[in-house]
């Protein structure tokens, strides 16, 4: 893996402890409960970027109803869910391929297309580089500039695309929440096409803003592939369902390289119901927009905290006077799980990612962080079941 430094703005950690490695994916509530003997009723997971409202009640009902069909195999063509996705985006079903979560599709892409060189701007989701390396590709890491809020600059990316066969972009980006505007994405798509680069845009968090989606452009492009998931916005990470959108020939190639029956009947039926629950969709967008701005405002006034604007359901912060790993531990003792930044390629232990949750939950987190940073008040009482902890 090579590292092309657009700008080096952080110190790389030489080693990570076993405990830090265990925390890397986020959302590992069970590990935290066992580590500190916590009462699970008082644990709030800010380390997992999932809709705090949970899944749509219509989706839950559909999944339960579909359990009566688990004695048969799913439709290998995933016809019903592909039609629902197509209606949701205003495209044709032949441009949609479903998978066992978007992660399975991230792994499928380099395995099928066998790119020699893959560009991954960092910081971003670690799965892109891992999938490319597993497929035997050489991964080139392009460091984004912190002073620009980790923005993907189209001009710099044009130079970075040179000699690449494939490039991954996350929009809005995980972990920064930075959104690449539609006009800049169009420029990036055009630049990638001119240089023969297959551009993969992971829109896992695009449902929170949706204005910059490239799904409709992917239908007409030979080099653009968009990925979506039902894990975050639709609150169904446990059902493992995601999809890719591309032109018909690209979808055909991917389908030929994919395993059979990658999605279950309950997952498909829940996803169909979720896509049709417009009340849930509108309320989710309003909730996240409102609480994200409140949380950002509260974080900005904390001592030793720098924030990055986000278009997604999470916020990246930089600590200037407190070790992020230590802060994560102190918060975890109180049943508050946040994600330490060095689990993302390109960040170190000065960064923390926080998922946006409900107003009450966000306030509890802010109170706990404030007390730890100011160091004038005792930390919020522990919710461990063992009072000696």
Image (cartoon, rainbow, N blue to C red):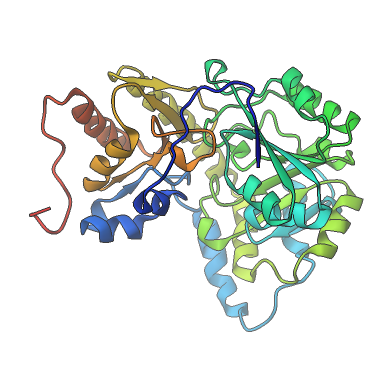
Q: Residue 79 in the image: state x and y as whole percent.
A: 78, 64
For the point 70% across and 46% down, which residue is it? 227
Query: Would residue 39 be found to the left or right of residue 143 on screen?
Result: left
Q: Is residue 245 above or below residue 178?
A: below
For the point 37% across and 27% down, which residue is it? 295
Quadrant location of residue 380? Answer: top left
Report the front residue among 209 and 68: 209
Q: Residue 185 in the image: state x and y as whole percent.
A: 75, 27
Q: Residue furthest front?
A: 14
Q: Is residue 38 visible?
A: no
Q: Residue 27 in the image: state x and y as whole percent.
A: 42, 51
Quadrant position of the N terminus in the picture = top right
Report the front residue among 134 and 37: 134
Query: Would residue 2 be found to the left or right of residue 113 on screen?
Result: left
Q: Is residue 344 above or below residue 375?
A: below
Query: Would residue 369 be found to the left or right of residue 68 on screen?
Result: left
Q: Residue furthest left?
A: 388
Query: Would residue 223 be found to the left or right of residue 370 on screen?
Result: right
Quadrant location of residue 159? Answer: top right
For the point 12% across and 58% down, which residue is it? 386
Q: Residue furthest bottom?
A: 71
Q: Residue 274 in the image: state x and y as whole percent.
A: 59, 53
Q: Is residue 125 above or below residue 195?
A: below
Q: Is residue 6 visible?
A: yes
For the point 59% across and 51% down, which residue is it? 230
């Amino acid at each position: 893996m090579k590292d092309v430094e657009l700008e080096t703005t952080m110190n790389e950690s030489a080693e990570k402890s076993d405990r830090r490695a265990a925390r890397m994916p986020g959302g590992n509530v069970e590990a935290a409960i066992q580590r500190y003997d916590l009462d699970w009723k008082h644990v709030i997971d800010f380390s997992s970027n999932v809709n705090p409202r949970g899944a749509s009640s219509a989706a839950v009902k559909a999944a339960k109803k579909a359990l009566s069909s688990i004695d048969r195999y799913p439709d290998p063509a995933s016809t019903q869910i592909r039609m629902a996705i197509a209606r949701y985006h205003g495209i044709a079903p032949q441009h949609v391929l479903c998978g066992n979560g978007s992660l399975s599709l991230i792994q499928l892409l380099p395995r099928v297309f066998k790119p020699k060189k893959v560009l991954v701007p960092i910081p971003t989701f670690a799965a892109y580089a891992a999938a490319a390396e597993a497929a035997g590709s050489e991964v080139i890491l392009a460091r984004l500039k912190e002073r620009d809020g980790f923005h993907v600059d189209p001009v710099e990316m044009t130079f970075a695309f040179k000699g690449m066969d494939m490039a991954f972009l996350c929009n809005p980006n995980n972990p920064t929440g930075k959104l690449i505007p539609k006009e800049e994405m169009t420029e990036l798509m055009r630049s990638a096409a001119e240089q023969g680069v297959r551009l993969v845009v992971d829109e896992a968090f695009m449902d929170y803003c949706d204005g910059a989606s490239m799904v409709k452009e992917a239908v007409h492009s030979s080099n653009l592939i968009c990925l979506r998931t039902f894990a975050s916005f639709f609150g169904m990470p446990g059902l493992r369902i995601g999809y890719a959108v591309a032109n018909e020939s690209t979808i055909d190639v991917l389908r030929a390289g994919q395993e059979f029956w990658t999605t279950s009947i309950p997952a498909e039926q829940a996803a169909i119901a979720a896509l049709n629950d417009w009340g849930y969709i509108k309320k989710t967008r309003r909730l996240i927009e409102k609480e994200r701005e409140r949380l950002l405002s509260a974080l900005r006034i904390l001592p030793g905290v720098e924030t990055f604007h986000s278009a997604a359901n999470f916020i990246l912060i930089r600590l200037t006077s407190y070790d992020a790993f230590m802060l994560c531990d102190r918060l975890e003792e109180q049943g508050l799980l946040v994600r330490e930044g060095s689990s993302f390629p390109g960040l170190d232990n000065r960064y923390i990612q926080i998922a946006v949750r409900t107003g009450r939950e966000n306030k509890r987190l802010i109170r706990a962080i404030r007390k730890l940073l100011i160091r004038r008040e005792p930390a919020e009482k522990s919710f461990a079941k063992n009072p000696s902890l």
